[in-house]
Image (cartoon, grey):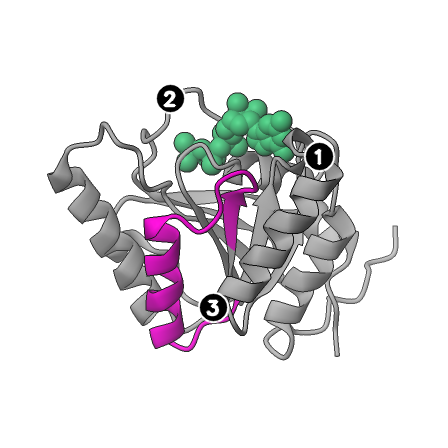
Amino acid sequence: MPELTARDFRTLRFLLSAPKLSALPPANRPEIAFAGRSNAGKSSALNTLCEQGNLARTSKTPGRTQAINFFANERLRFADLPGYGFARVPPAIKAQWAALIEGYLAQRETLSGIVLIMDARRPLLDFDRQLIAWGGAYGLAFHLLLTKADKLSRNEQHKALRTTRAAVEGATAQLFSATKRIGVDEARTAISTLLAGDLEDPAEPTPD
Ligand SMILES: Nc1nc2c(ncn2[C@@H]2O[C@H](COP(=O)(O)OP(=O)(O)OP(=O)(O)O)[C@@H](O)[C@H]2O)c(=O)[nH]1
Ligand SMILES: [Mg+2]
């Protein structure tokens, strides 16, 4: 089974930003979607996993990105879904996000799985659970990333992981920290597992 290597993460580049379903790139590479609440730490997690400081833009203004941002190399794609749950966003915009996210989950044939990123101090809030329910209805596999683990004591970390695993059957879960680089190898392996069977062999390295 071809597995992801560190190179697969390092070579991902911004592809395009899709504000609506009709703007999605052609579904011709296996894809992993990164989802989570606004400010959960999605962009930071992506950047840490890909060893690229500025791949996904981290923002002090939650709720600004309403599009799906795609990162790609020749083998795979990552889709950074719009952050949800930002309280000050008008209901009409929230409904638009929900339609975009649900439409994407429902129709994306090349979607291999979802990495759901949650603040380890507040995992499994309302929309997190709704997303898991939606994804489950479309037969999608989830890996749960409890990020900002550096903000918790060891005891609190283990408690968060235990309760999350107990609450969500059938999904894998782990602790993560973008700033302290906790759980990077574990997350890469989990993403590789989500993609298992969908990846093509890497192209033969070209001689210099
Ligand atoms: N301590 C700590 N802070 C983090 C970590 N990951 C992200 N942050 C901080 O959390 C804030 C939000 O991070 P982002 O990565 O921009 O969050 P996001 O989920 O992409 O946010 P939206 O794009 O608005 O949905 C930033 O101030 C980050 O520096 C982490 O692992 N540890
Ligand atoms: Mg972001």
User: Is the Cβ of the residue at disc 3 closer than 8 Å to that at disc 1?
Assistant: no
Badge 1 marks a residue whose secondary structure is loop
Instruction: Name the residue carrying label 1.
Output: 153
Q: Tell me which corner region of the image, top left, top right, bottom left or bottom right, holds residue 139.
A: bottom left
Q: Nearer the viewer, mark 3 or mark 1?
A: 1
Q: Nearer the viewer, residue 148 or 1?
A: 148
Residue 129: x percent and y percent? 37, 58
Q: Under 8 Å from ligand 1: the CB of mark 2?
A: yes
Q: Is residue 49 above or below residue 139?
A: above
Q: Are discs 1 and 2 less than 8 Å apart at CB?
A: no
Sequence-wise first label, 1 or 2? 2
Q: Nearer the viewer, residue 128 or 67?
A: 128
Q: Residue at x 34, y 34 (%)?
A: 65
- Residue 74 appears in the rendering: no
**Residue 153's image quarter?**
top right
The amino acid type of the residue labelled 2 equals: Thr
Residue 32 is situated, as x and y percent measured from the top left of the image, at 52, 60
- Work out which quarter of the rendered image holds the N terminus and state it: bottom right
Q: How many marks?
A: 3
Describe residue 116's horizontal placement relative to residue 161 as left or right: left
Q: Earlier in the sequence, mark 3 or mark 1?
A: 3
Residue extent of the magenta highlight:
116-142
- How far apart, in angstroms, are the residues tagged by discs 1 and 2? 28 Å
Q: Which residue is mark 2?
A: 61
The disc labelled 1 sits on which kind of residue?
Ser
- Judged left or right of residue 88, residue 41 is right
* Residue 87, percent from left and from top: 26, 32
Q: Which residue is mark 3?
A: 28
Depth check, mark 1 against mark 2: the one in front is 1
- Side of 131 relative to 114 (left or right): left
Q: Is residue 138 magenta?
A: yes
